[in-house]
Image (cartoon, rainbow, N blue to C red):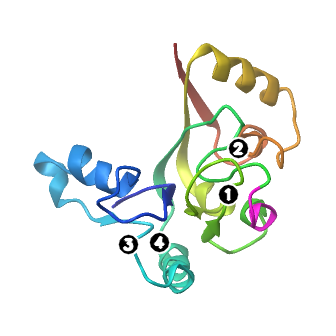
Amino acid sequence: MITLTDERCVPLDHPDSNAQMVQRLLLQGNAKHSRFIPLYDGAENPAAQGAALDQQFKSLPTFDAVVLGMGLDGHTASLFPGATDLPAAMDLSSDRAVTRIQPLTAPHARMSLTASRLLKTRALILHVTGDEKLRLLNEVSRGADVMHYPVGLFLAHNGPAIEVFWAP
């Protein structure tokens, strides 16, 4: 099974669709037989789709691996600082698996896996590129408010050890 950590609420044929990119670039050759679960399907009612996805993701087993990125604002998945519903999405005691997020600093509403669901994995990987992000990563890893830098929650969590891969 393959899924995304987050997705923009845009049609599949929109250039900003991560699902379209996965289908075009990743699900090729033998991988085309993989089960892909998109986080947004162009539903007329994203709230209803989000509720259905939440139930589906709650029933999935522990992930084998979760690969996260990090933005220059410290967001990861679509857990953006200041976004609507961020405190609920970051609540590790919550059993919610999927949430709808409205970033203040990025276009498009998003569907995102919650922090508690992302941490239900055997391997947690953070992929970071560029010197600016490396500086931010070093700053956040020394301890920072996770509501201001959501990636900090994953760096500080006692769950699966996070492996960081940095490339210039």
Residue at the spot of label 3: 41
Q: Disc 2 vs disc 1: Cβ atoms closer than 8 Å?
A: yes
Q: Nearer the viewer, mark 1 or mark 4?
A: 1
Residue at the spot of label 4: 60
Q: Callout 2: helix, strand or loop?
A: helix
Residue at the spot of label 2: 154
Separation (CA) of disc 1 from disc 3: 22 Å
**Amino acid type indicated by mark 1:** Ala
Q: Nearer the viewer, mark 1 or mark 3?
A: 3
Residue at the spot of label 1: 115
Q: Disc 3 vs disc 4: Cβ atoms closer than 8 Å?
A: no
Q: Earlier in the sequence, mark 1 or mark 3?
A: 3
Q: Is residue 6 above or below residue 111?
A: above
At 63% across and 54% down in the image, what residue appears? 119
Q: Callout 1: helix, strand or loop?
A: helix
Q: Residues within 10 Å of mark 1 (few under 14, many from 20)?
A: many
Q: Earlier in the sequence, mark 1 or mark 4?
A: 4
Position of the N terminus, as image quadrant, is bottom left
Q: Earlier in the sequence, mark 3 or mark 2?
A: 3
State the extent of the magenta-drawn residues as a range.
Answer: 83-88
At 75% across and 46% down in the image, what residue appears? 150
Q: Residues within 10 Å of mark 4 (few under 14, many from 20)?
A: few
